[in-house]
Amino acid sequence: ILAREGVVDGYGHMSVRHDKNPSHYLIARYLAPELVTKADIIELDLDSKPANGQAQKLYSEIFIHGEIYRARPDFTAIVHNHSPAVIPFSVTGVPLKPLYHMSSFIGLGVPVFDIRKAMGETTDMLIRNPARGRALALALGNHPAILLRGHGAVVVASAVPRVVARSIYLQINATLQMQAMALIQNVTYLDPEEALRVEKDVWDENGFSKDWDLWKKKVMG
């Protein structure tokens, strides 16, 4: 779904916390998202090591998932993507704001993680070890998403349909916001109370069920 909707290309990954063992999570082996099949899903512990001890080639940024799940027991699904639409908001100091009711979750805050500042050194920009993963999890806090400077985004939620929808609508809102800002300086955004109201009254755990059914039908034929 994320590949079809243009949120991920050959890069990016998604995970879900194991439903029977909250100290484990499920993610694909090192593979382009669009190519993943059921047979490619592996089980990792929160140290991001294969639960069965079997050697697997893993994503280099696997620690995004393990460290966020460790820090936030309430999160059950995570997406990391390199959506081009969000990159400008990670490097300009212009904050992402919700102007579209479908992306009301942005009103809960989308901080920016600057890995150079967080780690106090120049890096290769990737979250490729536990220390970087812990720093990212700390910066994320209880927000629904975080931008990685010059890199992409991490989106979290309490259910798979919700994290997929948030990833898609984060990208859409970023595109709409840039279009609106090109037209006028004073864009009208959802105010904080509106954003909270929409999140509470519209996008509950089943709020994206119509989208989810449609997206599944498209990718499954």
Image (cartoon, rainbow, N blue to C red):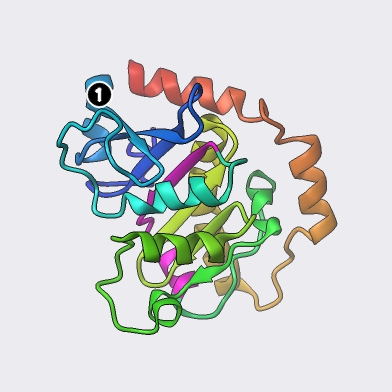
- Give percent across and percent down for residue 1: 39, 32
Name the foreground residue: 166 vs 190: 166
- Where is mark 1, residue-wise? 37
Tell me which residue sits at (59%, 72%) in the image. Answer: 95
Q: Is residue 99 left or right of residue 85?
A: right
- Give percent across and percent down for residue 18: 46, 28
- Give percent across and percent down for residue 72: 58, 48
- Give percent across and percent down for residue 133: 41, 60
Check if residue 31 falls in the magenta segment: no
Mark 1: amino acid: Thr
Where are the magenta residues, as a range?
A: 76-90
> Among all residues in the image, which is located at the extreme front?
53
Check if residue 88 falls in the magenta segment: yes
Badge 1 local density, few (<14 within 10 Å), some, or many (20+)?
few
Name the foreground residue: 146 vs 219: 146
Tell me which residue sits at (45%, 52%) in the image. Answer: 67
Tell me which residue sits at (41%, 67%) in the image. Answer: 87
